[in-house]
Image: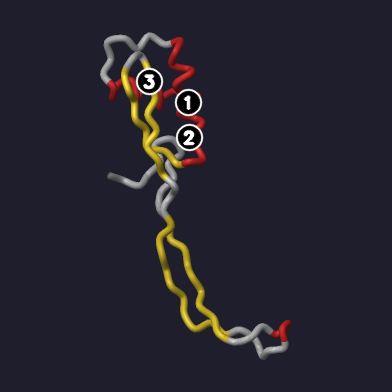
Amino acid sequence: MSRVCEISGKRPGVARKITQRGKAKRLGGVGRKTTGVHKHWQAPNLRKVTVQVAGKPITFRVAMSHVHKVYELAERAKGMNLEGLSEKQIKNRLLGLLDK
């Protein structure tokens, strides 16, 4: 399962952790020295959100910052004719609404 938000496209990114030693000059020391730089991954805060659309459960993997958009899409889908479509087709139609 990929770690990508289906709405915003957020994905894991690389960050750096800088390790230092010494005492800061403003605290009376001779300054901080960098002893190492460590790369690590930061993943988006993804959650599964399930909504009922046209009587079928549709599940999205979205970042927590975009959960409200899933519920907005479910509200916009109430006026659409989605009867007879599969869950995957309904999901693709809803995601297509984001561009408009």
Identify the residue under disc 1: 71
Which one is nearer the viewer's eye here, 22 or 88?
Answer: 22
Distance from disc 3 to disc 2, alpha carbons, whole Å, reads: 15 Å
Q: How is the image coloured?
A: secondary structure
Q: Earlier in the sequence, mark 1 or mark 3?
A: 3
Residue picked out by circle 2: 67
Q: Decide which of 65, 4 is in the foreground and name it.
A: 65
- Name the disc covering residue 52, or none: 3
Amino acid bearing label 2: Val
Q: Residues within 10 Å of mark 3 (few under 14, many from 20)?
A: few
Question: Could you say where residue 49 lies in the image, as x and y percent from the top left?
Answer: 39, 33
The N terminus lies in quadrant = top left
Mark-to-mark CA distance, 1 and 3 = 10 Å
Q: Is residue 1 above or below residue 78?
A: below
Cα–Cα gap, marks 2 and 1: 7 Å
Instruction: Tell me the amino acid under the disc marked 3.
Output: Gln
From this view, report whether residue 18 is shown above or below residue 47.
Answer: below
